[in-house]
Amino acid sequence: MSSVFTKIINGEIPCYKIYEDDKTLAFLDIHPETKGHTLVIPKNEVDKIYELPDEEYQALMATVKKLSLHMEKVLGVRTLWKVVGTDVPHAHVHLLPYDETWTYGRTLELTPEEFESIRAQLAL
């Protein structure tokens, strides 16, 4: 059975895509903790990051770094990384633009127009 992330990769579920290459995909989290909250995933469905083959792990982390630097440049704030691994059984890294009002577990309610505006701002 495919994870929700694999369904996004396969185009079965839409997303607000920020970046894609042959090994990774990055898109806005639909339950964001901060504006710009992005998920970076490997295209290979593996439950835990440390189960990825070395080349795919390195590709994932290269994308995380690339997007973090881009987000900081565009938004002018630090980018926080979270690796939790309990919500979806598909390795992923959360990138959260720093917001001093952030609290763990908070979810923002954004309109489709707000998501699209953020996507356009962060797309690489």
Image (cartoon, rainbow, N blue to C red):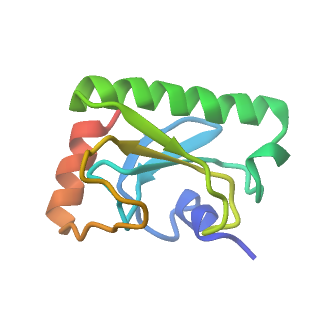
| Residue 8, percent from left and from top | 53, 63
Give the vertical position of 117 relative to 123 (above or below).
below
Q: Quadrant of residue 16?
A: bottom left
Is 48 placed left or right of 27 in the picture?
right
| Residue 45, percent from left and from top | 73, 57
Quarter the C terminus occupies? top left
Is 61 placed left or right of 113 in the picture?
right
Q: Residue at x 42, y 67 (%)?
A: 105
Q: Disc count in the image? A: 0
Q: Residue at x 37, y 51 (%)?
A: 37
| Residue 107, percent from left and from top | 33, 68
Viewer-proximal residue among 89 and 103: 103
Q: Residue at x 84, y 47 (%)?
A: 51
Is 113 placed left or right of 124 in the picture?
left
Viewer-proximal residue among 115 and 86: 86
Give the vertical position of 11 relative to 93 (above or below).
below
Quarter the N terminus occupies? bottom right
| Residue 73, percent from left and from top | 28, 22
Q: Quadrant of residue 103?
A: bottom left
Viewer-proximal residue among 63 and 106: 106
Q: Residue at x 51, y 63 (%)?
A: 11
Is 26 placed left or right of 31 in the picture?
right
